[in-house]
Amino acid sequence: EEPFVVVGASLAGLRAVESARKSGYTGRLILVGAEEHLPYDRPPLSKTFLDPGDEPAMPHHRTEDELRALDVELRLGVPATALDTAGREIILGDDEWLRYERLVIATGARARQLPGKQLDGMHTLRTVEDARSIRRALDAGCRTVVVGGGFIGSEVASAARKRDVDVTILEAAPLPLVRAVGEQMAAPCADLHARNGTELRCGVSVTGLEGEDRVEGVALSDGSVLPADLVVVGIGADPVTDWLTDSGLQVDDGVVCDETLRADTEVYAAGDVARWPNPLFGRTMRLEHWTSAAEQGAAAARNALAPAEATPYGTVPYFWSDWYTDKLQMVGITAADEVTVIGDLDGTRWLALYRHEDLLVGALALNMPGKIMKYRAMIGRRTAWQDALAFAGR
Ligand code: FAD
């Protein structure tokens, strides 16, 4: 029998190989990764890894010994460059063919770049190398501009403020985070920047960069130029599907899968690269969240090994973000008819509940880590709005 191959050696890929073994699969198992590193965790890269002080250890998920104990063949530092589903083969690098019996695609996402010239001092943040460069620049006290008011940019701004470095966030939309937290809650989240000395400029976009080789400033659509020695671009990520162009798989902002994460015969996808109909919400989603990437990796491998008994993968989306001394957590979806806030938005703890029709569909919390998972479970159980309000003490 040909091996079970997993492409993408990060969170979803790791959970896929672990789940294959847990499911009782004893055959050859190969984990292919473009990065040279053992699988490592990304959320810390924009959080504790950027904290002032000595550089923290690399946030590996598992040691080499732990992976060896799973009897996984690691092919690291080599990208898959093509997939032939009819022949059940992938190409590694330039010319190495690898046949598979079953395949899980877990190639994740890559950070979107600003169009135009790329200068020294400009960074996106996706890999540990990116995080190291940004750390060094922050330690050097660089004047920092963050392009994009999303979560990663906000976390970088927070790391700058921990060093008392001046930082400006530029957001093209009238408010940041609207897609992530909805219209109503964007302003209270944005307010955390003002409270912590980060300048947030909305409704302004970058028209160009100043500098020859090194960045010296950012030219803006209002005609002004912001001086900067460090520019961190946090304008989103795109699923890594370019290697699938001739594969015959359907790609549409992600690898299109069914409810069981199946993309084709014996081909499954998981994590940031996968788009699938989430049965809990009756809508198609592609999430870029840690928890679902881990769960999908495990589910995809299980289903790949037993397609006849494959189970749909449903989840209530969940992500968190740490800014300054605050923890924001969101569960569910933001497409809501009404948002009710519990607590004082000027205070250090609040909760927002999202209603769609007569159901609780989402919850966003500032510094309420003990509570938010209860709401996640309630959304999963399709809890009535009145019952959710009653639970919240309303
Ligand atoms: P990835 O982690 O993107 O890994 C994909 C892997 O596949 C990479 O190693 C890549 O090199 C490799 N690869 C790509 N193409 C190929 C190829 N052709 N051949 C072989 N290998 C390939 N989520 C949260 O919920 N909360 C957070 O606070 C949070 N913070 C984050 C902070 C940062 C800085 C980043 C970058 C992400 C954060 N996330 C957070 C998102 C979370 O990390 C991702 O959802 C998760 O990493 C997705 O895992 P993945 O395995 O699907 O993809």
Image: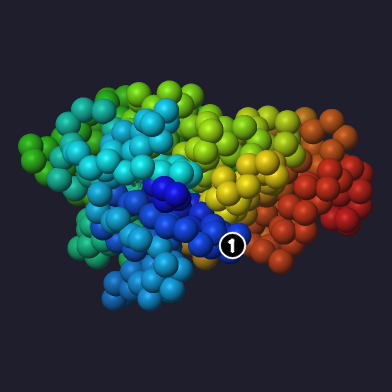
- How many numbered markers are drawn? 1
Residue drawn at the location 26% of the way across and 28% of the way down: 115
Task: Return the residue nearer the eye: 32 or 157.
Answer: 32
Taking 68 as reference, is 270 above or below it?
A: above
> Looking at numbered disc 1 in the image, what kind of residue is underneath it?
Gly
**Residue 30: horizontal and vertical position, in percent?**
38, 55
Residue at the extreme front of the image, as rendered:
1
Task: Return the residue nearer the eye: 229 or 42.
Answer: 42
Residue drawn at the location 42% of the way across and 28% of the way down: 86
Relative to 244, 349 lies left or right: right
**Residue 304: horizontal and vertical position, in percent?**
57, 45
Q: Quadrant of residue 182?
A: top right
Task: Return the residue nearer the eye: 48 or 267.
Answer: 267
**In what element is the residue under mark 1?**
loop
Q: Read off the residue under disc 1.
A: 24
User: Badge 1: how crowded within 10 Å, few (<14), some, or many (20+)?
Assistant: few
**Residue 88: horizontal and vertical position, in percent?**
41, 36
Residue at the extreme left of the image, as rendered:
212
The image's colour scheme reads rainbow
Q: Using the rendered image of the protein, determine whether residue 110 is visible from the camera's viewpoint.
A: no
Residue drawn at the location 8% of the way across and 41% of the way down: 213
Taking 368 as reference, is 209 above or below it?
A: above
Task: Decide if ligand 1 comes within 8 Å of the CB at mark 1.
Answer: no
Residue drawn at the location 62% of the way across and 32% of the way down: 258
Q: Quadrant of residue 112?
A: top left
Relative to 6, 286 lies left or right: right
Relative to 314, 251 lies left or right: left
Q: Using the rendered image of the protein, determine whether residue 247 is visible from the camera's viewpoint.
A: yes
Taking 15 as reference, is 169 above or below it?
A: above
**Residue 167: horizontal and vertical position, in percent?**
34, 51
